[in-house]
Amino acid sequence: MGRRLGHVAMALLGALLFGTAGLAVGSWYGGRGAVPLSPEAARSAAGELLSGVEPIGSMTERGYRYGVFLAPDDVGGSRVEFQYGDGPDCTLSEQVRRAAETRGWRELRPVPGTACDGWRAERDGLTVTLTHTRYASRLSITQSAPGGFRAATITGTLLAAAAGAALFWVVVRSRRPVPLVVGTLVTVGLFPPAVVTWTDLAVHRLAEPVWPVWRGFVPVLVPLWLVLLLIGVIVFARRRDPAVPAPRRSRPVMPADQ
């Protein structure tokens, strides 16, 4: 019974790790082909949500997450930011919330900030996020996900989770050195980006792309995998070395029959 529970736990671990990777791949595939952001549409949205409040500066930039630049047609690939004041102005949060509720913005939800919470809302292919830092309040506007984004994300997650559960189930049941070494390498390699991915999802959900997490980990994970693979080969080679044969005991000589 205990061994079977261990097998089930390993299968669940494989489903979680591979499913998280599949979620990232599915969200990347589903987020391709998004319409690049129009600066005019961004200014119109900012004026609608923060009517009567003039920004002290604005900038248009290419999307950048976890050390990866996003393409203009990726979700989050185009971004326009407006800065308000020289410090955090938490009264803007209430103004954005009221304007979003009365003007038909959807998916309205709070966003944690340094000084106070902001808000995020979607409408007409735009995602608007108000955040507050120690230095300023910023309204960030980017394009929303295209149609089929959630379906691609869910499909990638389920397929990868099923593959991961089956793979880890086979590995743990085989109890052979090579599959166990491979399973260890896969677990160590997938665990850190999976943790960062779920941490990011807990804050932003799917409003921000998570696939750059995995791209950002590649320069770290590849050397780590190579070192672990070398250690696994050395350990496996030592286990395969034939043991020194024990000295054979001589058979006692029996006295001849009289």
Image (cartoon, rainbow, N blue to C red):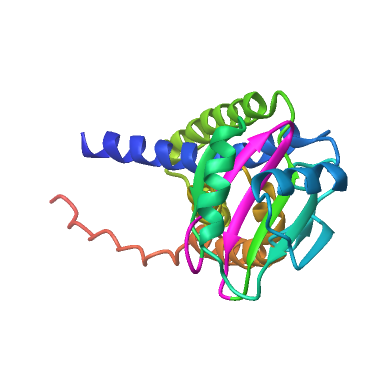
Q: Position of residue 13 (x, y in %)?
A: 43, 42
Q: Is residue 129 magenta?
A: yes
**57 to 155, vertically: above or below:** below
Residue found at x 68% / y 58%: 53
Is 30 in front, or is 239? Answer: 30
Q: Position of residue 133 (x, y in %)?
A: 57, 69
Residue found at x 48% / y 33%: 165
Residue 133 seen anywhere in this rendered image of the structure: yes
Is 199 in front, or is 204? Answer: 204
Is 52 in front, or is 76? Answer: 52
| Bounds of the magenta segment | 114-134
**241 to 11, vertically: above or below:** below
Q: Residue furthest left?
A: 258
Residue found at x 27% / y 58%: 251
**In the drawing, does residue 183 fall left or right of residue 6?**
right
Residue 177 seen anywhere in this rendered image of the structure: no
Give the main secondary structure, helix, strand or loop, of the magenta stretch: strand
Q: Position of residue 138 (x, y in %)?
A: 66, 61
Residue found at x 34% / y 35%: 8
Q: Position of residue 99 (x, y in %)?
A: 58, 41
